[in-house]
Image: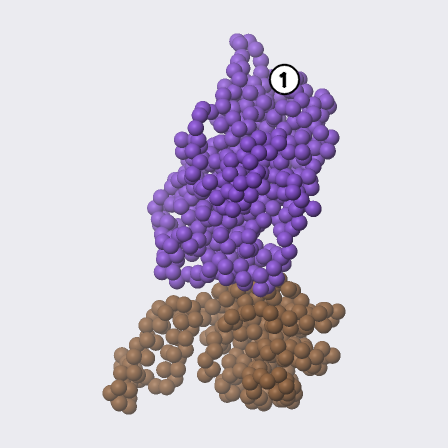
Amino acid sequence: MVVNRIGREIPKNIQGIGKLKPYEGVFKKTALGVKKAPKITFQKRGETKIIDSLKQAVIKAGVRNGMTISFHHHLRNGDYVVEMVLDILSDLGIRGLSIVPTALFPVHQSIIKYIRQGVITSIQGSVNGPIGEISSRGVFDFPVVLRSHGGRARAIEAGDVEVDIAFIAAPSADTYGNLNGIDGPSACGSLGYTMTDAMYADKVIAITDHLVDYPLSPISIPQTYVDYVVKVEKIGDPKGIISGTLEITKNPLRLIIAKKVVEVIEASGLLMDGFSFQAGAGGTSLAVAKFVGEKMEKKGIKGSFGSGGITGYFVKMLEKKLFRTLLDVQSFDLEAVQSLKNNPNHLEMSASFYANPHNKGCAVNKLDTVILGATQIDKDFNVNVNTESGGLLLHGIGGHMDTAAGAKLTIIATPLLRGRMPIVVDKVITVTTPGETVDVLVTERGIAVNPARSDLIGKLKEAKLPIKDIRDLNKEAYNLTGIPEEPQFTDKIIGLVEYRDGTIIDVIRQVV
Amino acid sequence: MNAKLRRSALYVPGNDPSMIQNAGIFGSDCIVLDLEDAVSIEEKDSARLLVRNALKSIDYGDTEVIIRINSLYTPFGREDLEIIGRVHPDGIRLPKTESAKDIKQVDRILAQIETEEGFEKNSIKIMPTIESAVGLFNVFEIVKASKRITLINFGAEDYTADIGAERTREGKELFQIRTRILLAARVAGIQIQDSVFSHVRDIEGLIKETKFIKQLGFDGKSVIHPTQIEPVHQVFTPTREEIILANRIISAIEEAKKKKSGVISLDGRMIDAPVVTKAKRILKYAQAAGII
């Protein structure tokens, strides 16, 4: 065991994974060497990429026991592709697969049976809900490797993860493997999460329910990366793919938090021409986006870009010219899909473009402000988004640690308590995002600023914002809830939280 | 005029732990933890204990904490008072007050609790609610029945039902009760809050009604949802022009005091005591809104 920079014990080596590098600090790790290159595959004149069935396609792609295959979550909770592929691989008697999903959703619960049957023996990627829970109970021999969106793109480019076959759900595909996400009955918008896999996997199989004549326009994933195209009846359920109009929170407590967040952004001095901003699709984030938009409009501020997962609120800001550009890795609602299709300033970006720390420049480095959530935050500003209070691994990382590291102002917006659980704690169970990349915590009961940001403390004080010491917020929370009992773990490590640069920031243990 | 600011009083159901826990953070001047209408009969005792424990353990800061107990004419009112009085709320909102006798009874119980618990005498206030024709008829006696009374309000629903009026969003039917208890409040030198505006989503309607009651002379309004607080406070926030004028009035009297001049005038208008009172009041509201 070694103790990493934030005081967490990390094993030197893990069977089935190899040597681990402990986290050293936010931009400390340098990357050397060359990127991974995929196998050369090519098409001769007259050959076709269209394969009659998915079964034939996986056989042609040379599927074998123990391979690494990848999936992506742009169809979100409407996705049929993960299950479709695993059904076929299981029927073919394939075992010992390692799967590399960008995220899994409740709809993917059905793959639990394949985990139990040994079809899947390891996961490198986000595990959510029930799949996270069985991981926490020790179902796998090797730990799940959790990576952020940027960290996953880095790992694939660096060859830390070698994907044998990438399965890409394509809302629109032509007969020669050009793909996009904006047309067809299962339109989802951006295909950002699939792009790195398309470029680096040895084989790429596109699965579509909307096959068009060659050439498709516009093209998100070009034919040069795609080996085979399979037409199926449906790749997903539109109801689960795209949400209806997302609404800002009506919860008065969360509205208070959102208003305070906007006050912090304003006081920071960043809200001026050229402002760039990211907020997620949760109710509080949407409220912040709405209020920031109103403030920009009132003050006549012209921002540069909004990024990340895009919602109708960001689209409205683009249309009102509050942003010049949207950088879209995932389109959450219908407005975002329509805008990506119709507005030339609404750009699709890959996960690597978005957040990979080891390419020649990622979008998060250009962010002024990001609003993020937390399941826990501690007195050192370390944030946990992976494990719940009972110690179970229930959530993925998303772009949390990436945007926190990149943005000039990283704000964690969270209620002080959820139900009877304190969110501001003495020590988080799991560190996902290191405190050195977190600037401000906003709760309904006060704002705390990372002491390392004395410049910001000065600005917020000048704006007469009520600043509290994070230790006092922790005390306030404990006064209301009592000090929660620590969850009990065994010694078995069931998850590795990999920092975006490939080092290990924390480990997650099996729950007793 | 009583110095305390009571622009808003947020009703919080006394049986909802999460709302009780967060009641103080929405910025209302007062919170009213409700043991009466918000709580069903089966939950009366558990809500009473919940509210008691909340008062013992939660720090509500500067927010005035008022408990609406059940009417003394129910089987619960007396015990509410016994249990809640001992954790020293800022005030007891007494629903369905009909006579000076009701107030005197509460006064006696509170006095005894204060003695037994070693609390300061008369430190727990009484805030009667008028909700019936009889109560309104007796309101001038009610407001004078105890030194503890600092605030009065009324219940529009019960009152209109009692007098046989139609209940409308516009609220013309409340004119009589509003003006009569306002007059009683001023005679007794206490504050007065308006009834709730129950159409939570109609913020425009809320603002209109609040402007109207402010014009009548009310000090504040009861609200049933946190989103109603800010609009109500906005109405009670003086305009820039009002603040400037108020400041000039205050400087004018200070100047006159220095010069020992008897008659004070500003822009050719005589400044007398009521003008000064109003100016002070405007500055107090401006301060509360954080704009001066």
In the displayed structure image, the side of residue A186 where residue A324 appears, left or right: left
Q: Which is more toward the observer, B178 or B271?
A: B271
Against A401, residue B275 (above or below) is below
Q: Which is more toward the observer, A264 or B69?
A: A264
Image point 55% across, 28% down: which residue?
A: A161
Find the residue positioned furthest to the top.
A45
Image point 61% across, 26% down: which residue?
A: A69
Image point 45% across, 83% down: which residue?
A: B1
Disc 1 element = loop
> Residue A200: x, y in percent?
52, 24
Image point 38% across, 60% down: which residue?
A: A461
Find the residue positioned furthest to the left.
B259
Q: Which chain is brown?
A: B
Residue that carries the numbered disc 1 in the rendered image: A62
Q: Which chain is purple?
A: A
Q: From where the camera sits, is residue B96 visible? A: no
Crowding near the residue tagged with mark 1, few <14, some 14–19, many ≥20 C-alpha atoms within 10 Å? few
Q: Quadrant of the N terminus of chain A?
A: top right
Output the chain of dot 1.
A
Against A441, residue A196 (above or below) is above
Q: State the scheme by which the image is colored.
A: by chain
> Residue B6: x, y in percent?
50, 75
In the displayed structure image, the side of residue A407 where residue A393 appears, left or right: right
Q: How many marks?
A: 1
Residue A118, by quadrant, is: top right
> Residue B86: x, y in percent?
63, 79
Q: From where the camera sits, is residue B249 visible? A: yes
Amino acid type, mark 1: Gly
